[in-house]
Image (tube, rainbow, N blue to C red):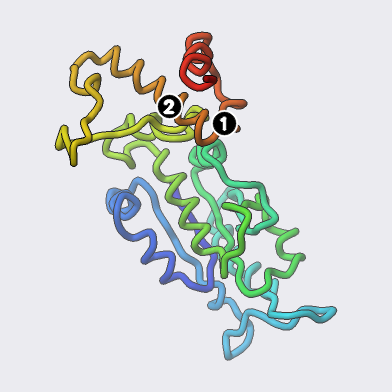
Amino acid sequence: MKFNIMTLFPDMIKQGLGSSIIGKAQEKNLIEIDTINIRDYAYNKHKQVDDYPYGGGAGMVMQPEPIYEAYKSVTSKLSNKPRVIYLTPQGKTFNQEMAMELSKEEELIFLCGHYEGIDERVIDMIVTDEVSIGDYILTGGELAVMVMVDAISRLIPNVLSNGVSATTESFDDNLLEYPQYTRPAVFMDKKVPDILLSGHHKNIDQWRREQSLIRTYNKRPDLLEKAELSEKDKKTIDKYCKL
């Protein structure tokens, strides 16, 4: 999969996504991340890409021409036009379901805004999806893009060394992940639950499912409304949660 990221700060993207699992995925050619510097497409000698907003107001607005030219530099090489995702607080909230959907695309284009925003005309012309990572304001779209690329990349085959990991983590089935433990078996008088040391995999799986249900009920009960619960799951919730 290829991620094309249009930004004013390409080094920020490269540094943020150049290490750990995402960096290794690039080395293995499982994913490709290409940064397009919007400033390279400015029409003036000072490479200015913003100007004062019509109608007055604080701050500066990114001009449409450099963004559109940057977009054309990507799409002119392609037979099909990929989805263009603009990171904005006004967008649909990013979640695991959206990450799964986007992970099935062969190529994506991301547009990182900055300053007070982007000229609306170029948004109307090229953007297919407006996405937010939460109800708060960042100085630019770069951090939000890195969050999305990380979440999407983890769902691409072979990016994670353990292929099961992506399907057993929080939000995969609208449940939070069960508690995890490792050595030592006793830490400051706190023991690992005996069942995890039993070697009985069926009982361990059942315990983990119960813990996921209990944890979700206690921490994110809103998720249970979308989760597919069996009759056994519902009995677990009634037994352990509704006391």
Q: Amino acid at mark 2?
A: Ser
The amino acid beneath tag 1 is Pro
Mark positioned earlier in the residue sequence (1 or 2): 2
**Horizontal relation, residue 161 to residue 6: left or right:** left
Q: Is label 1 in a helix, a strand or a loop?
A: helix
Report helix, strand or loop for mark 2. helix
**Viewer-proximal residue among 135 and 29:** 135
Q: How far separated are the C-alphas under marks 1 and 2?
A: 11 Å
What residue is pinned by disc 2? 212
Q: Residue 95 in the image: state x and y as whole percent.
A: 55, 42
* Residue position for label 1: 221
Front residue of 103 and 213:
213
Residue at the right extreme, as displayed:
55
Q: Position of residue 173 (x, y in %)?
A: 49, 27
- Up-down: is 67 above or below 226? below
Q: Is residue 124 above or below residue 38?
A: above
Image coordinates of residue 175 in percent, x first then y, are 48, 29
The residue shown at (69%, 79%) is: 60
Compared to 117, does 149 lie above or below?
above
